[in-house]
């Protein structure tokens, strides 16, 4: 039985990797003392990624339920 990664896992993981790279690129901003700006952007982005994850999980569950109803 093949197991594939769900879209609700892959997309947020890819976005987290992207956020890590962008955080590294933004380090000079942090070193200049713009703490609120730096961590605010990271926080808002993390919130968006978490909301996206739960939204995608909900869509997958609804799709699975719809497919189960069609099989009956």
Image (cartoon, rainbow, N blue to C red):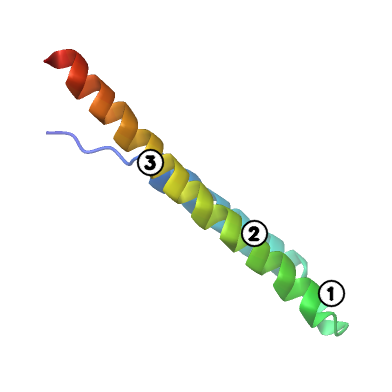
On screen, residue 25 versus residue 53, left or right, reads right
CB within 8 Å, label 3 to label 1: no
Task: Quickly name the residue at label 1.
Answer: 29
Q: Secondary structure at mark 1?
A: helix
Numbered circle sitting on residue 58: 3
Q: Secondary structure at mark 2?
A: helix
Quarter where residue 8 is shown: top left
Sequence-first disc among 3 and 1: 1
- Report helix, strand or loop for mark 3: helix
Quadrant of the snapshot with the C terminus: top left
Q: Where does label 2 land, which residue? A: 45
Q: Residue at x 46, y 44 (%)?
A: 55
- Image position, residue 71 (x, y; %): 14, 15
Dot placed on the residue nearer the N-terminal end, 2 or 3: 2
> In this view of the protein, can residue 37 be seen by the observer?
yes
Spatial CA span between label 2 and label 3: 20 Å
Cα distance in 3D space between marks 2 and 1? 17 Å
- Residue 38's x, y, as percent? 76, 73
């Amino acid at each position: 039985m093949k197991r594939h990664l769900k879209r609700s896992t892959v997309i947020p993981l890819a976005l987290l990797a992207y956020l890590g790279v962008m955080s590294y690129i933004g380090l000079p901003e942090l070193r200049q003392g713009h703490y609120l700006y730096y961590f605010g952007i990271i926080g808002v982005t993390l919130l968006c990624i978490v909301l996206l994850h739960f939204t995608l999980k909900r869509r997958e569950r609804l799709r699975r339920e719809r497919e189960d109803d069609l099989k009956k």
